[in-house]
Amino acid sequence: MDNLREKYEVVIGLEVHAQLKTKSKIFAPDSTEFGNEQNTQISPITLGMPGVLPVLNKECVNMGILLGLALNCEIPNRCKFDRKQYFYPDLPKGYQISQYDEPICINGWIDVKGKRIGITRAHLEEDAGKLVHVGSAGINGSLYSLVDLNRAGTPLLEIVSEPDMRSSEEARAYMEELRNIVRYLGVCDGNLEEGSMRCDANISIMPKGSTKFGTRAEIKNINSFSALQRAVEYEIDRQIEIVEEGGEVVQETRLWDDNLKETRSMRGKEDAHDYRYFPEPDLMPLEISREWVEDIRKNMPELPEAKRQRYMSLGLSEYDARIIVDQMPLALFFDEVLRLGANPKAAVNFIMGEISAYLKENKVEINETKLTPENLAELIAMIEKGTISNNIGKQILVEDMITNGEKASAIVERKGLSQISDEGAIKAIVEKVVNSHPAEIEAYRNGKTNLLGFFVGQVMKETKGRANPKTVNELVKEILG
Ligand code: ADP
Ligand code: MG
């Protein structure tokens, strides 16, 4: 397959649904809270009972504008809502209120690892309910299906990209950057596994050098970044095989099965006219004043790309900056440590080293540990002042500070760990230690100079790591002559 790959260019466009973190639904006052008893957040509006009217939740519009600005979109003066008709048991009204030809955001872009990816549009819409298939093997094999409408009417922002991506790696990087953006904006949890962010991948292939795009397949049911990459890879190979055998790719919707690691056909692709879109008669077109947009722009938090650039200007490598920004709680923690005046290099060394290792091992986020930015900043200051050595610092960080939240100064006091910098005191210990190893002294003086490390190590052991290593080194050399 690999050499066949070289004959084709891959074209990918993503449609990403982000569930907006509002308290209530987009057109109804029901709570959007997740995980409650089924069918308890279903007002007559959500159920689409006769005579009810939708009322637009302003918070959804605020979040839509905020995200649009972060995606460098234009926010037109006017947008409107439309009905998209289809019939499915999870859609109580028989139509979804969405935005068709006048969305809230248009013509944007984001830069992903140095490449600009166009954003065609982003529009507001309501989510459907959830079907639970009971029985054995999926929809067809199940005995019956249950409907939970708690999710119906939850606000979504659908972000449609231009077909600008050319590999599964680019598609994944774009999706990861979008996830970071929605998280830093606070408009969506960005959790693919839990479905608060969902992604449909449109994929086509064309001969290298061609400018005419091939027919695309749309892949649904992707619920992790690695699944996105796997699904795209699988689909590329599937399409190449079809074309190589003289066949044609058909436009259709396919489902990714992450257990079988394959896509399978779900339905032929609907065209827009299948949905019989028309303007939602129960909602006025929405006028968005420039003041409204500017008010929201003023509250824009720092975006992931700007954060990475700032970290790099503090001396972090691009790699470290990426790793930290990709984990929002860690980045917010780091920012706070910096705000408290800590040395950035020292903070990064702890964060990328001992702290990240601890988080990984215990599968927790930094804000789920007892370590506070204040305590880390204090620890770093104590090391810089020479009160404790770096090694002692690492030790108490892992053994005490992360697990029990104790302050560095309190631990050092309790355990008597402050560094011995007094030369006279260190000298006495060095003499004692060196003189208790006569055989090694002789070997050293006969040219085995790498025994220096042995003596230094013995002194450090004797002082439980509290002696200033530089002073120890100098004194050992001096005594051994
Ligand atoms: P639909 O509702 O039919 O899915 P949208 O306009 O919502 O249409 O989304 C179409 C998506 O498919 C966009 O992300 C677009 O970039 C992408 N796309 C369009 N043509 C192609 C193609 N030939 N190959 C790959 N992706 C494509
Ligand atoms: Mg679509």
Image: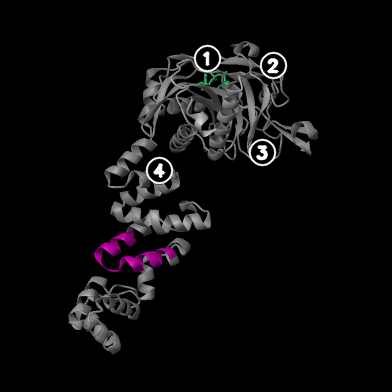
Q: Is residue 351 above or below residue 409?
A: above
Kind of residue at disc 1: Lys
The residue to which callout 4 is attached is 325
What label does residue 321 carry, if any? none
Name the element at disc 2: loop
Distance CA(mark 1)–CA(mark 3): 41 Å
Cβ atoms under marks 4 and 2 closer than 8 Å = no
Q: Please indicate whether residue 350 sits to the left or right of residue 179 in the image.
A: left
Mark 4 packing: few (<14 Cα in 10 Å), some, or many (20+)?
Answer: many
Q: Name the N-terminal-most of marks 2 and 1.
A: 2
**Residue 51's mark?**
2
Q: Which residue reaches farthest right?
A: 143
Inter-mark Cα distance, 3 to 2 = 46 Å
Element marked by disc 1: loop
Q: Amino acid at mark 2?
A: Gly
Q: In terms of sequence position, does the residue under pointer 1 or pointer 3 come before the other?
A: 1
Q: Position of residue 119 (x, y in %)?
A: 45, 23
Label 2 packing within 10 angstroms: few (<14), some (14-19), many (20+) = few
Q: Main secondary structure of the magenta part?
A: helix
Q: Is residue 107 left or right of residue 476?
A: right
Q: Alpha carbon of mark 4 to alpha carbon of mark 3: how far?
A: 33 Å
- Magenta span of residues: 378-398
Amino acid type of the residue that numbered disc 4 sits on in the rendered structure? Val
Where does residue 347 sit, x and y in percent of width and height?
Answer: 33, 54
| Percent position of residue 322, x then y | 39, 43
Residue at 30% across, 69% down: 388
Looking at the picture, which amino acid does disc 3 mark? Answer: Leu
